[in-house]
């Protein structure tokens, strides 16, 4: 899918301003977006859209089952996400096949959600995109915000969140681009090594800097 160039979009002062919130697994992207949402900002969660496009009975669900077979399913007929995660962390071709099934459908749903926001006079939209750089979607957005945390902290969070071993947590992080590589392509960085309260302060500081640079969007956000 051909996506518009981010720098050209900024040059043309597009509306709405599309801001991607990204970061490696366990960095705290969702916590950041929860804070943005609590402050009254428009936030779209692509993980939620991804669940919708592979819900039982959907076209995406059928394509995944056709590609991966019974091992992609739980006993209740839902997708076995843990099994799929193990497959894609060890098989590059399988990961690409899964991405080719899901990603175009997420983009379509994201465009629908953005169009709805625009009809409600929204001129600033934040979008939580976990695999922004890995999917090659960075040029679709006008501004990129990266949530970053130290490796060990992310591993511990993944182990607790997903009930996986340290080895599985590391495997998931290893299929994602390193933070140092992502930082080179990122305009704003939010560090998340501390408590929820500390993170809320970091988000507020980010917004202050963001509005200073994109002041024209402040009043309509």
Image (tube, rainbow, N blue to C red):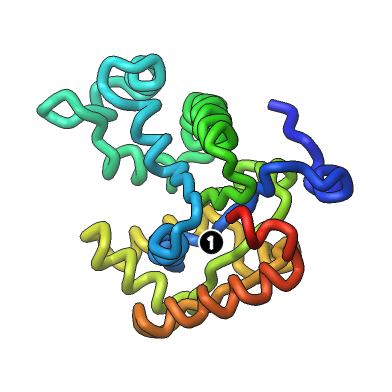
Q: Quadrant of the C terminus?
A: bottom right
Q: Residue at x 26, y 21 (%)?
A: 56
Q: Is residue 156 left or right of residue 93?
A: left
Specify few, some or many for label 1: CA neighbours under 10 Å numbering under 14, 14-19, or 20 or more.
many
**Image location of residue 49, percent across then percent down:** 42, 35
Q: Is residue 35 left or right of residue 188?
A: left
Evaluate whether residue 100 shows in this view. no
Q: Residue at x 54, y 55 (%)?
A: 176
Residue 8, image quadrant = top right
Choose between 112 and 183: the one closer to the eye: 112
**Image location of residue 60, percent across then percent down:** 40, 21
Regarding mark 1 in the picture, which secondary structure is present there? loop
Residue 69, image quadrant = top left
**Image location of residue 199, percent across then percent down:** 44, 78
Instruction: In the rendered view, tell whether residue 48 sits above or below residue 192.
Output: above
Choose between 45 and 57: the one closer to the eye: 45
**Image location of residue 171, percent across then percent down:** 42, 58
Q: Quadrant of the N terminus?
A: top right
Q: Residue furthest front?
A: 219
Choose between 12 and 221: the one closer to the eye: 221
Q: Residue at x 34, y 38 (%)?
A: 84
Q: Residue furthest left?
A: 76
Q: Residue at x 49, y 28 (%)?
A: 109
Q: Number of numbered discs present?
A: 1
Which residue does the numbered mark 1 point to in the structure image?
A: 23
Evaluate whether residue 198 shows in this view. yes
Instruction: In the rendered view, tell whether residue 189 sits above or below residue 50.
Output: below
């Amino acid at each position: 899918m051909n996506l518009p160039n981010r720098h050209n979009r900024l040059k043309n002062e597009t509306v709405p301003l599309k801001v991607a919130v990204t970061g490696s697994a366990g960095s705290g992207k969702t916590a950041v977006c929860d804070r943005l949402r609590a402050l009254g900002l428009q936030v779209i969660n692509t993980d939620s859209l991804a669940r919708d496009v592979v819900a039982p009975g959907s076209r995406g669900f059928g394509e995944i089952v056709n590609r991966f077979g019974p091992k992609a399913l739980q006993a209740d007929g839902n997708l076995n996400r843990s099994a799929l995660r193990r497959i894609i962390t060890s098989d590059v071709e399988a990961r690409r096949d899964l991405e080719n099934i899901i990603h175009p459908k997420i983009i379509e749903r994201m465009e629908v959600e953005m169009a709805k926001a625009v009809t409600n006079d929204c001129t600033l939209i934040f979008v939580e995109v976990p695999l922004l750089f890995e999917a090659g979607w960075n040029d679709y957005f006008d501004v990129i915000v990266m949530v970053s945390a130290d490796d060990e902290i992310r591993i511990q969070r993944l182990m607790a969140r997903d009930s996986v071993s340290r080895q599985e947590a590391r495997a998931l992080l290893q299929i994602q681009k390193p933070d140092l590589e992502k930082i080179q392509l990122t305009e704003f960085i939010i560090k998340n090594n501390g408590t929820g309260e500390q993170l809320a302060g970091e988000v507020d500081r980010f917004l202050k800097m963001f509005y200073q640079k994109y002041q024209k969007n402040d009043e309509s956000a």
